[in-house]
Image: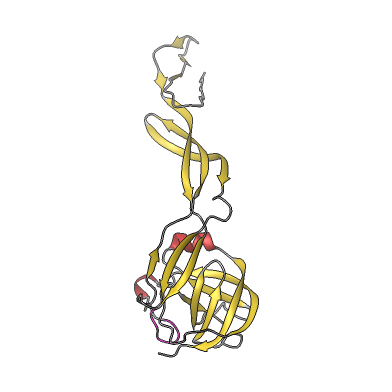
């Protein structure tokens, strides 16, 4: 007969295994360590980031200006240990405490824009996804866009029939970007924003965003 004990809290326990011999007698002193406990962890949920254009910075360089009061995500995780070895972890509860409303970080993003003013051509809502500079190609990556520019933050892929290449676009929730890449799945009212890490791409996911398309184009 096996008895397993489960505890909430950081506890250590022994669950006794009682096994019978051929005569039905219990064999004592056979133990298996089986421990289950729950722990609460916290991860920061940063305040929304607002990007401002700074032509004194290199293209694609981001300077975090700080500010904003972040929130946090609290997760309760159940961990199962057997014979001193962690066997599994399961999130059993999660709650998010958002950043204080109206609290924002202000960051500067470098962009070489030879215009003192930008002229808005149109505003539209599109479906967006995200990709990394290597486009998931690993060692085969060229890190170059369809127009030959370096793939980096501040670059987006578009359907040139909808948004002409080399057009400046402001993507809400992302920032000012240059439409200088294309993609096989980017057709119609879809865009793909370039981000720095796979984790950021996963967080971005697939979402509808509003974009502001400017008349100006950057060709150098």
Residue 160, quarter of picture:
bottom right
Residue 170, quarter of picture:
bottom right
Q: The C terminus lies in which quarter of the figure?
A: bottom left
Which is more toward the observer, 79 or 59?
59
Q: Which residue lies at the image location 59% right of the left edge and 78% below the top edge?
A: 212
- On screen, residue 151 versus residue 94, left or right, reads left
Q: Which residue lies at the image location 46% right of the left edge and 88% below the top edge?
A: 218
- On screen, residue 200 versus residue 172, left or right, reads left
Q: Is residue 79 above or below residue 199?
A: above
**Which percent across, then down, holds residue 70?**
49, 50
Q: Which residue lies at the image location 43% right of the left edge and 87% below the top edge?
A: 114
Residue at the outermost bottom position: 219
User: Magenta span has 102?
Assistant: no
**Which percent across, then down, holds residue 91?**
53, 41
Which is more toward the observer, 70 or 126?
70
**Which percent across, then down, holds residue 127?**
62, 72
Q: Is residue 44 above or below residue 109?
A: above
Which is more toward the observer, 31 or 184?
184
Residue at the outermost front position: 116
Q: Is residue 188 above or below residue 9?
A: below
**Which percent across, then down, holds residue 134?**
40, 72
Q: Which residue lies at the image location 65% right of the left edge and 77% below the top edge?
A: 124
Which stretch did the figure color magenta? 145-150
């Amino acid at each position: 007969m096996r008895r397993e004990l489960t505890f909430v809290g950081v506890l250590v326990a022994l669950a006794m295994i009682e096994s019978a011999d051929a005569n039905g007698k219990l064999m004592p002193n056979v133990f298996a360590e089986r421990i289950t406990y729950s722990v609460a962890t916290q991860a920061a949920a940063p305040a929304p980031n607002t990007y401002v254009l700074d032509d004194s910075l290199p293209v694609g360089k981001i300077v975090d200006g700080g500010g904003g009061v972040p929130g946090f995500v609290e997760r309760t995780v159940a961990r199962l240990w057997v014979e001193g070895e962690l066997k599994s972890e399961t999130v059993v509860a999660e709650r998010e405490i958002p950043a204080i409303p109206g609290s924002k970080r202000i960051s500067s993003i470098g962009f070489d824009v030879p215009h003192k003013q930008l002229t808005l051509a149109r505003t539209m809502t599109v479906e967006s996804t995200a990709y990394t500079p290597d486009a998931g190609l690993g060692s085969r990556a060229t890190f170059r866009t369809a127009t030959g520019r370096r793939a980096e933050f501040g670059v987006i892929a578009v359907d040139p029939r909808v948004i002409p290449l080399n057009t400046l676009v402001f993507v809400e929730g992302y920032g000012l970007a240059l439409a200088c890449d294309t993609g096989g799945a980017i057709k119609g009212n879809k865009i793909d924003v370039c981000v720095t890490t796979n984790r950021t791409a996963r967080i971005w996911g697939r979402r509808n965003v509003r974009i502001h398309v400017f008349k100006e184009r950057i060709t150098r």
